[in-house]
Amino acid sequence: MAEKKIDILTFSLAEIKEFLVKKGEKAFRAKQIHEWLWKMPVNSFEGMTNISKDLRTLLNDNFIIQSVKVDDMQISKDKTVKVAFRLYDGALIEGVLIPSENRATACISSQVGCNLGCEFCATGKLGLLRNLSHGEIYHQVAELIKLAGEKYNLSLTNIVLMGMGEPLLNYDNVLKAMNMVSSEEGLRMSPQRITLSTVGLPRMIKKLADDKVKFNLAVSLHSANDKKRTEFIPANKRNSLDELKESLIYFNEKTGQRITFEYLLMDGINDSVKDAAEFAEYCKSFPVKINIIEYNSTGDSRFKRSSNEKFNAFVIFMKSKNLVVNVRRSRGMDIDAACGQLAGKKRE
Ligand code: SAH
Ligand code: SF4
């Protein structure tokens, strides 16, 4: 049986060099190949135009480039673009480009599906197929950079790990990919422009703190009441709000960074003044920034968007407690590209 080809994206520059030398090729070619893989990524060895045909054939015989290919694209009225990426094994994931006047944000996936099963989330209904490799995570960013330039003449300014999956359950690959995004060898984007969003896994948050990460941490809180939170976020059962708080205090102490809380307002579920009061109380232990988010329909009739009245009252209450509050209105809803709607559905 033919040997399985190796994903060249798992090779460091030094390893590519070693491979070339072993095959009698010039070592300096390694840098060129590495640049084609990361700095100005191509999807095939064919695309490495300054490399000889023989060397490209040698690479092709030994490696694959396990990156992501744009399979389908939908554009919203508000210019948000949802991209379906096809992976080497046929699986589909989604990424979203959110342009605005002077910035462009890439929302990328960390897993194919998610096994945490939050009741309000379309991705949660899929279950987990597999983790993404660090190359697959990184290359979504690279593709969305190309798209932002070609379509809107914009540079990518921000990255949010808010697509499909729970990034802290694919810890090593997510960190590797984000390190590469920030590195000289990669896209040289400042980690301050990257936000990792998590359902809130205390053990992994402490690990982020120990690893002294420089990107922003957002926690999808959605309720500061254990009983209530467990009803729609099953993962809360194993990770209580007290444990979460303790890990966030630790994170703040170790990294000096403030915490972002995401709070999704769902009609009659977590949008009362009492809910707001519990939330404000929870915010007291560390510096926070709060994003209040509109609920996006996923076809589950148990969950509905809060009325404007309730939404505004919630925001006003939080602001009255002197908290930094942003309101996040949905983008790309007409094409199911908004938060929580990513489910890898193919267009008919
Ligand atoms: N697993 C991570 C990141 C992916 S989900 C997390 O849970 O944070 C990205 C964000 O979308 C989270 O804040 C999540 O709570 C939110 N979300 C999920 N379903 C949603 C929906 N139907 N409407 C709006 N936001 C939703
Ligand atoms: Fe997974 Fe996040 Fe969706 Fe929950 S909200 S199911 S953790 S992707």
Image (cartoon, rainbow, N blue to C red):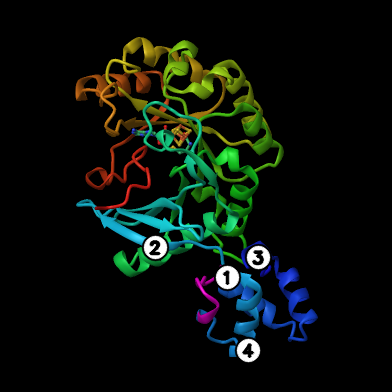
Of circles 4 and 1, the one toward us is 4
Which amino acid type corresponds to the residue marked 2 in the rendered image? Val
**CA separation, marks 2 and 1?**
17 Å
Mark 1 closeness class: few <14, some 14–19, many ≥20 residues within 10 Å: many
Question: Which numbered mark, 4 or 3, is in the foreground of this view?
Answer: 3
Spatial separation of the CA atoms under disc 1 and disc 3: 20 Å
Which of the two marks, 1 or 3, is nearer to us in this view?
A: 3
Q: Nearer the viewer, mark 2 or mark 4?
A: 4
Q: Give residue 309's position: percent from left, percent from top.
A: 20, 21
Query: Could you say which quadrant of the image residue 253 lies in?
Result: top right
In the drawing, what numbered circle is on residue 54? 4
| Sequence-first disc among 3 and 2 | 3
Return the residue at label 2: 70
Marking on residue 37: 1
Q: Marks 4 and 1, Cα distance to the nearest angstrom?
A: 18 Å
Alpha-carbon span between mark 4 and mark 3: 21 Å
Tag 4: amino acid: Asp
Q: Gap in Å between the C-alphas at discs 2 and 4?
A: 28 Å
Q: Earlier in the sequence, mark 2 or mark 4?
A: 4
Q: Amino acid at mark 1?
A: Leu
Q: Earlier in the sequence, mark 4 or mark 3?
A: 3
